[in-house]
Image (cartoon, grey):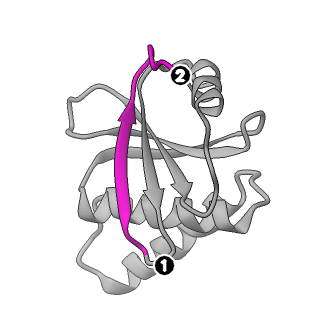
Amino acid sequence: MYDICHPSCDYFAIVLNVRLQYYHLCKLGCNDPIKTSTAFYVYIEICEVKRYWDVKYKYNEELDVIYFEVKKREHSRLEIYVPWPTKYNICLEKIEEMQQLLQNERLTFVFKSEDSSSVFYTVSAGLSK
């Protein structure tokens, strides 16, 4: 079956694949429906709108966060995207903890609001308080 990031022309296959992706995303271990649905909408956006490559969703239990490993182009380096609902606050300490536990000094947060708009914001190590 085709990945949602490179769907076939068959509409039924696309719809089925979208539902399967949502099902698998919900089974990662996150029990927060707001985080899960936010992650799903970001997943659709980075696959279908941004057309990124090799999008893989993962869950870090210690952080209680769903994140994506993404390549912007076929031969690009791997980047980490973290979907974050604007309904939830985030502090610098949490960002630093994510950088440490995800073993990546550069993270791109996708802040998703309830009106479905998104803001992509990349943070790097060395942020000062």
**Corner quadrant of residue 50:** bottom left
Q: Is residue 74 above or below residue 125?
A: below
Locate residue 36, reporting x and y percent. Answer: 64, 62
Q: Quadrant of the N terminus?
A: bottom left
> Does the magenta run of residues contain 117?
yes
Residue occupying the point 44% across, 14% down: 126
Which residue is situated farthest in the top direction here?
A: 126
Q: Which residue is mark 2?
A: 129
The answer to whether 83 appears left or right of 58 in the picture is: left
Q: Secondary structure at mark 2?
A: loop
Q: Is residue 15 above or below residue 67?
A: below
Which residue type carries mark 1? Leu
Using the image as rendered, state which of residue 26 and residue 93 is in the foreground: 93
| Residues rendered magenta in the picture | 116-129
The answer to whether 118 appears left or right of 22 in the picture is: left
Mark 1 or mark 2, which has the lower sequence index? Answer: 1
Q: Which residue is mark 1?
A: 16
Check disc 1: other Cα within 10 Å, few if <14, some if 14-19, many if 20+: few
> Does the magenta run of residues contain 6?
no
Marks 1/2: CA–CA distance: 46 Å
Q: Secondary structure at mark 1?
A: helix
- The disc label shown at residue 63, or none: none
Is residue 2 visible to the viewer in this orientation of the structure?
no
